[in-house]
Amino acid sequence: MPTYTVVWMIDEDDAETPLQAAQLAHQRCFLPGTHATVFDVVDQATGEVTRVDVDPAEAFPPTVLSDDYAHAMGAVLACEA
């Protein structure tokens, strides 16, 4: 079975520290009316990155992102390991 890393990104410009940025992003996930429905999904075996919208009302077909983006995402994920 494949292993995937699922990433939801948000720009957080109301924070003064990385910890505060993470806390604010976490809070925003659960606010009423917040729509965190678009995710980048990285196939760990191939490095392929696919953008997926899980909102059935606005969903678009899953989109394989460019190699440049996939490479950049791989670099980000490597820094997290």
Image: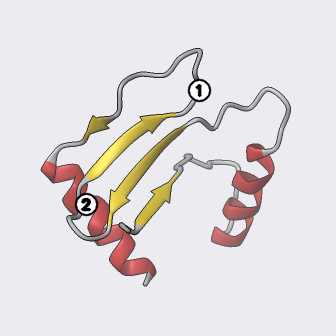
Relative to residue 56, is residue 71 depicted above or below? below
Q: Label 1, on which residue?
A: 55
Q: As drawn, is 46 to the left or to the right of 58?
A: left
Rendered position, 47 above or below 38 = below
Kindly give the residue lying farthest to the front in the view shown.
1
Q: Residue furthest bottom?
A: 81
Distance in Å between CA atoms under marks 2 and 1? 26 Å
Quarter of the picture containing the C terminus is bottom left
Q: Which quadrant of the figure has residue 80?
A: bottom left
Q: Is residue 33 toward the left or the right of residue 72 in the image?
A: right
Q: Residue at x 53, y 50 (%)?
A: 8
Q: Give the percent coordinates (x, y) of residue 1.
A: 38, 68
For residue 41, which numbered disc appears in the image?
A: none
Label 2 crowd (10 A; few <14 / some 14-19 / many >=20): few
User: Which residue is depicted at the point 55% across and 33% down?
Assistant: 54
Where is residue 53? Give x, y as percent.
Answer: 49, 32
Q: Amino acid at mark 2?
A: Ala
As helix, strand or loop, the secondary structure at mark 1 comes to loop
Residue type indicated by callout 1: Asp
- Left or right: 59 with respect to 74? right
Q: Position of residue 28 (x, y in %)?
A: 76, 44
Would you name the residue on which mark 2 appears?
72
Q: Residue 7 or 21: which is nearer the viewer?
A: 7
